[in-house]
Image: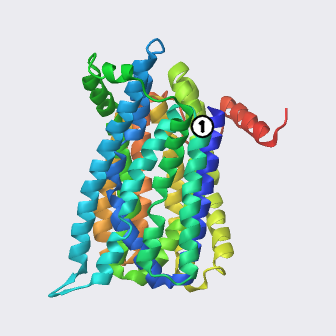
Amino acid sequence: MLKNSLMQTLGAFGTTILNFLLTLSYAGILGPEKFGSLVTSQAHVLIWSLLVDLGLSQAMISALASAKKRSDNDRQEFRARDLIFRVLGIRLSGAVIGGIAVLFFSYRRAMHGDSFDTNHFVQDIAFMPQLFALAFQQTAIAYGNFCGRQRLSVTANFSGNFVTALLAMCLAFMGRSIPVLLLAQSWGGFLVAIIILSSFLISKPAASNARVKKQKEGPWKRLAWSAIQRDAWPYALIFATTVLWSRMDQITASNLLGEEIAGNYALAVRLVAIPTLMISAISLAIFPDMQRMGHDDPKKIHIYIGLASKLVFRYGVIAFALILFCIGLLFGPIVPKFKSAIHLLPWFIPGVWAYCLHNFFISALYGLRKYKKAVFAHLYAVSIYSLSLYFLPQWIGIQGIIWSYNIFTLVLAYSSWQYLKPNFPSSFQLVGSLIPEESILLGSILKRVFNKD
């Protein structure tokens, strides 16, 4: 589990670095207004990715695991192949619906009275193939992870992102139009799926006629759908709330405040993603421990959460303020046209701090198998976020959008803790001095980090 977590973390870092370099290239070449226009066009497409994900990666892995029968290889091979096509079919259907929505809203955005802005319409739909690429990419990666081929999945994902990012950067330096840049970025998922699935096709023998015969035997059809539905919905709702949080702010900034301000906001959010990625990597690294402790000894989760919360409450604000200050110093000279974006960074400190807390709380809820509570926390947070995003930007402009961003993570941290609190002993302290067990855990972590006995 540690090996797989490290592999996934390194892959996430590598992909994020590629996308970050691409963002800096776009920002330096296009300037705030055009960059804001490009990012807004992406957001109008990516918001519909919630119809593609649907929590199906986790559901497919769970269904494959529950269907596994080592004594019946032919049936198991059919079940695996059948599940892949079912999940892919659902995702492609979601991509079609999302594509229709993109076309509809792009058409409305391009209409100005009796005139039709063809260039604007083409730009808004240029990134639409990304929805279909995501359907193939996510299905292939989930299957690769289930089969224990994390290295293949990570390598393929990085390769697809590398090729598309490199192509997009080259086209940007050549001065190509925004629709061309968006289209160049939109097909990487197809390459990822081709690499992963072709690897399995090469390494596995061709399907036998016996597997086709097994198709009509047993209650598999009903069991397959129930397994997918049972495990998908919590992840689908949580992913949907995350997509709304990460895309609606950009769309609101563009519609209310104009493309130039939206471009500065877009770069600020991507710079803020550096510390949030660090937090996600830590959360991902301890996730297997949380799952194991939740099953074997839930009391140990209290020690992890106690240590994490006390460190975050004690040092979090200072640490994140310092990180964002260093990011501003480092990247300010690289993108001199985006001074406004650098000046926005300090306003994100409360949101990043709360993001750190809620990651630990949500991981603990998962470890304790409180999936419904995790979903309710996200739904509560996104409802408050939607209200704040509707009113605050109209009152205080760009600061209102930033505070809406912060409100989501603050409410999510608070609500997830309220759902987690009943599972902890009454003597548990979220803040204060470390208890002996937490001090011992901190010492063991530091020893591992510095590789000392």
Residue at 46 percent of width and 28 percent of height: 368
Most foreground residue, 419 or 17: 17
Judging from the image, what secondary structure is the residue with disc 1 in? helix
Residue at 63 percent of width and 73 percent of height: 328
Quarter of the image where the C terminus is located: top right
Task: Relative to 344, say whether 313 is above or below.
Answer: above
Quarter of the image where the N terminus is located: top right
**Residue labelled with disc 1:** 286
For residue 116, what is the image quadrant? bottom left
Residue at 51 percent of width and 22 percent of height: 295
Task: Relative to 263, say whether 313 is above or below.
Answer: above
For this orientation, the residue located farthest to the left is: 114
Type of amino acid under label 1: Ile
Report crowding for label 1: few under 14, some 14 to 19, many 20 or more residues within 10 A (C-alpha). Answer: some
Task: Relative to 287, say whether 115 is above or below.
Answer: below
**Left or right, 380 with reference to 208:** left
Q: Position of residue 308 (x, y in %)?
A: 60, 42
Q: Is residue 307 visible?
A: no
Color style of the picture:
rainbow
Q: Position of residue 141 (x, y in %)?
A: 49, 43
